[in-house]
Image (tube, rainbow, N blue to C red):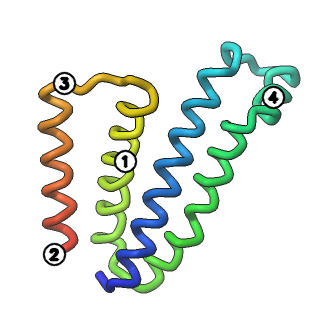
């Protein structure tokens, strides 16, 4: 992977992770899901949720740069792994979600996998 590709991959991963964390925060402030216009209006008025959707969607721009110039078979696992690590860390920090031994071990295995794929 090129240095430029790696930079854009980091940007896309960060935008995706922050988008997911904003979606999570927004979803926790909404009433239980209902399939009606009132609920949709509440969703669209929730700045966290709308911001999360925007960032999640905007992450496509740097991601397009990555996959246009780098192997998808390397780029995609790196993006998913990086996003998993960032979302898990953010969920722990912002939402007090716990860490178990199995979760820490899994994160270490994923981080190792990202490094191995990046060097291939």
Q: Which residue is mark 4?
A: 40
Q: State left or right for residue 34 relative to residue 67.
A: right
Circle nearer the N terminus (2, 3): 3
Answer whether labels 1 and 4 touch (C-beta < 8 Å). no
Labelled disc at residue 119? 2
Q: In this rendered view, identify the residue nearer to me: 72 or 25.
A: 25
Helix, strand or loop at mark 1: helix
Numbered disc in front, either 3 or 4: 3
**Among the 4 quarters of the image, the one containing residue 70:** bottom left
Helix, strand or loop at mark 3: loop
Q: Which residue is mark 1?
A: 86
Q: Which residue is mark 3?
A: 100
Rendered residue at 58%/30% (across/down): 25
Residue 94: where, in percent of width, then height?
Answer: 45, 31
Numbered disc in front, either 2 or 3: 3
Circle nearer the N terminus (1, 4): 4
CA distance for labels 3 and 1: 16 Å
């Amino acid at each position: 992977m090129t240095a430029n590709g790696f930079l854009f991959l980091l940007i896309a991963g960060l935008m995706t992770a922050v988008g997911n964390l904003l979606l999570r925060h927004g979803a926790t402030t909404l009433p239980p899901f209902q399939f009606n216009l009132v609920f949709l209006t509440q969703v669209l008025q929730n700045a966290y949720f709308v911001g999360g959707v925007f960032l999640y969607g905007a992450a496509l721009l740097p991601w397009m740069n990555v996959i246009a110039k780098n192997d998808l078979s390397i780029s995609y696992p790196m993006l998913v792994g990086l996003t998993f690590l960032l979302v898990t860390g953010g969920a722990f920090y912002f939402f007090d979600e716990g860490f178990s031994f199995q979760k820490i071990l899994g994160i270490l295995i994923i981080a190792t996998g990202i490094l191995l794929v990046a060097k291939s």
